[in-house]
Image (cartoon, helix red, strand yellow):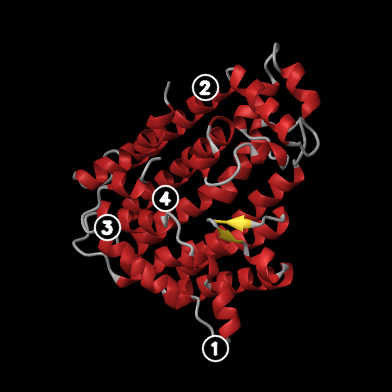
């Protein structure tokens, strides 16, 4: 699996992410011991910390000599939104596990999970407010886009008529809005020039699209071990992603796939559906779309960032993310 933190090539990133971890754990503490335990459950389970890493990388790529506490807290605010959304997602999906541990809803029930997710969103907003009105407004707008993306996904669940435009709009909201916000907040908190801030914002949006399309392709072609969850789960839950949408349009295999979809799948049906999708050009076509977004990500920061290894690594990140899926 691709290690994004390694690909970023930011000097001292490991130390900065340690600062992120400490700040993140401190931020979920409450005066109520039970709420602290629940809110810290997924934080303690670990994770890629992609969004804080992007905030730190954005600041470093902009040429700052030192990553400030404001940049770290800005990255933490976006990560808290992400984790809070996972609490809510697990309730909607009735998930039993998350990040290799029992999900909050499975352990303490849906009501506790929803309230803990709300608490994390509130903590994110509190941190953002301490960083200024622009950061606070941006994070609030990002939470709104996240909800819009998730509603779009729910609205088209189990729909074999889901369009590519609906899919792209949904992942722009539920995934790319967060990576874009992380880059923008990191840049703003580092005090970078407005042109650099805007370039990094566009980079984050395009990179987020690459990240999600890659994840959706892996759901079709990957293994349980690669994903850390059952492969094909999107098909089971009726979330028809780009490779599936392209496969449904295939004149040869689409008619065989369509009757399988439209309702929850058992294990055999799931495996059959994955096999059909892999037999079409859907995966290759989805990766081509992802590569186009990777081009957009690189173009967004080309000539905008000060020359250096971090800027170069950031520009190439989208393409590197797809390297293990090429061919």
Q: Position of residue 20 (x, y in %)?
A: 36, 67
Tell me, yes or no, whether the two marked residues, 2 and 4, touch with CB atoms within 8 Å: no
**Is tag 2's residue or tag 3's residue first in the polypeptide sequence?**
3
**Is tag 3's residue or tag 1's residue first in the polypeptide sequence?**
3
Disc number at residue 201? Answer: 4
| Residue pointed to by mark 3 | 13
Does residue 251 sit above or below 235 in this rendering? above
Does residue 299 sit above or below 205 in this rendering? above
Q: Is residue 84 left or right of residue 296?
A: right
Task: Look at 27% across and 42% down and name the residue there.
Answer: 313
Label 2: which secondary element: helix
Q: Position of residue 57 (x, y in %)?
A: 31, 54
Distance from disc 2 to disc 1, alpha carbons, whole Å, reads 51 Å
Label 4: which secondary element: helix
Say which quadrant the N terminus sits in.
Answer: top left
Say which quadrant the C terminus sits in.
Answer: top left
Q: Mark 3, mark 4: which one is toward the viewer?
A: 3
**Is tag 4's residue or tag 1's residue first in the polypeptide sequence?**
1
| Residue pointed to by mark 1 | 31
Distance from disc 2 to disc 4, alpha carbons, whole Å, reads 28 Å
Distance from disc 4 to disc 1, alpha carbons, whole Å, reads 36 Å
Task: Look at 77% across and 24% down and name the residue there.
Answer: 258
Quadrant hosting residue 64:
bottom left
**Is tag 2's residue or tag 1's residue first in the polypeptide sequence?**
1
Assess disc 1: are there few (<14), some (14-19) or many (≥20) residues with their C-alpha within 10 Å of its C-alpha: few
Tell me, yes or no, whether the two marked residues, 2 and 3, touch with CB atoms within 8 Å: no
Distance from disc 3 to disc 4, alpha carbons, whole Å, reads 20 Å
| Residue pointed to by mark 2 | 284
Can the viewer see residue 302? Answer: yes
């Amino acid at each position: 699996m691709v290690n994004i933190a390694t690909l970023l090539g930011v000097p001292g990133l490991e130390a900065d992410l340690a600062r992120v971890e400490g700040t993140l754990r401190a931020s979920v503490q409450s005066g109520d011991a039970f709420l602290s335990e629940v809110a810290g459950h997924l934080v303690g389970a670990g994770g890629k910390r992609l969004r804080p890493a992007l905030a730190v990388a954005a600041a470093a790529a902009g040429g700052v000599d030192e990553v400030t506490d404001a940049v770290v807290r800005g990255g933490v605010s976006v990560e808290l939104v992400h984790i809070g959304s996972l609490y809510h997602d697990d309730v909607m999906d009735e998930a039993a596990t998350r990040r290799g541990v029992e999900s909050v809803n499975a352990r303490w029930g849906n009501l506790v999970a929803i309230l803990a997710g709300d608490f994390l969103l509130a903590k994110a907003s509190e941190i953002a407010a301490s960083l200024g009105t622009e950061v606070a407004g941006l994070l609030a707008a990002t939470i709104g886009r996240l909800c819009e993306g998730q509603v779009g996904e729910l609205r088209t669940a189990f729909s074999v008529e889901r369009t590519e435009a609906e899919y792209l709009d949904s992942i722009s909201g539920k995934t790319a809005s967060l990576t874009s916000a992380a880059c923008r907040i990191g840049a703003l908190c580092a005090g970078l020039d407005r042109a650099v801030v805007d370039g990094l914002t566009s980079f984050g949006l395009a990179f987020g699209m690459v990240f999600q399309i890659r994840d959706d392709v892996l759901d079709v072609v990957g293994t349980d071990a690669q994903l850390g969850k059952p492969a094909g789960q999107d098909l089971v839950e009726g979330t028809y992603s780009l490779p599936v949408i392209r496969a449904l349009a295939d004149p040869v295999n689409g008619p065989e796939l369509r009757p399988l979809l439209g309702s929850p799948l058992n294990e055999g049906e799931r495996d059959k559906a994955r096999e059909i999708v892999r037999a079409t050009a859907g995966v290759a076509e989805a990766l081509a779309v992802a590569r186009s977004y990777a081009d957009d990500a690189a173009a967004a920061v080309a000539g905008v960032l000060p020359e250096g290894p971090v800027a170069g690594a950031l520009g190439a990140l989208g393409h590197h993310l797809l390297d293990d899926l090429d061919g």
